Amino acid sequence: MTAISDCFETLGHNGECALIPFITAGDPDLETTAKALQVLDQNGADIIELGIPYSDPLADGPVIQASSTRALQRGTKLEQVLEMLQEVTPKLRSPIVLFTYYNPILHRGIDKFLQQVAAAGVAGLVVPDLPLEEAAGLLQPASKMGIDVILLVAPTSSAERIQAIAHSSLGFIYLVSVTGVTGVRSQIENRVSDLLKQIRSVTDKPIGVGFGISETAQALQVREWGADAVIVGSAFVKRLAEGTPEQGLNAIAQFSQSLKAAIKTTNTSTNIPLD
């Protein structure tokens, strides 16, 4: 079993929903990123998604775009991120999933890239601009190295495409809750419930829901609809960027705790503090 599938199996036995926070590597700096990974790991995160800053982040909304720009302006490079991870991942309970666009992978070559991220302790990859039709070249060698390539299902995906993605995705299936880019939304669309049921009808793989979840009430709603994981990005990135690095770290610790408390069980009678 991979680290990610093992995580979901453990949570499933306990009837728990996974919390997957996202932060951008190098924002505000790699030293803070290293601390943030450990803070999240100690405050409710089950898996952590780490974004590699990229100059043309097509799937990202303004908050994460701005964080990538800040990281790139500070000179953050993939090699530096992997060096940092090599030091930090042995200290973490939570598997690390890299969120990266395909160009950095193509630039290095698939085999070399996979060897580098495996050496850094990375457990999974999300590559939002890699279509299913071209994914086999990454999925197959990654699987041999024990790295899960997690594929995305969009709200506009056809039934046939959902089934194909569900069959090929490793680790879990990433359900995008909105048509559009990442970012804070005031509410989660009800069609997410139907999409979860549709995916569930063709696979028993875990399903994570992301894009637009920014409050504990939204996270709880997605959990009650049947998601196995709640993925929260922009709300974490925004909190980490506000104030001093220490203030940002404290803010994401508190937010992570509140989210995990909200989604840990489906007992709605529990008094959950809402943002």
Image (tube, rainbow, N blue to C red):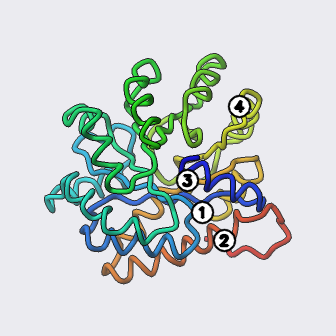
Figure quadrant of residue 177: top right
Label 4 is placed on what type of residue?
Answer: Thr
| First in residue order: circle 1 vs circle 2 | 1
Residue assigned mark 4: 203
Figure quadrant of residue 28: bottom left
Looking at the image, is 45 positioned above or below residue 200?
Answer: below
The percent position of residue 155, horizontal first and vertical second, equals 59, 31
Q: Quadrant of the C terminus?
A: bottom right
Label 4 environment density (alpha carbons within 10 Å; few <14, some 14–19, many ≥20): some
Find numbered disc 2 in the image and state the secondary structure of the residue it sits on. loop
Camera-near label (1 vs 3) is 3
Residue assigned mark 1: 215
Distance (Cα) linking label 4 and label 2 = 32 Å
Find numbered disc 1 in the image and state the secondary structure of the residue it sits on. loop
| First in residue order: circle 1 vs circle 4 | 4
The percent position of residue 227, horizontal first and vertical second, equals 70, 48
Q: Nearer the viewer, residue 212 or 115?
A: 115
Q: Residue at x 27, y 51 (%)?
A: 53
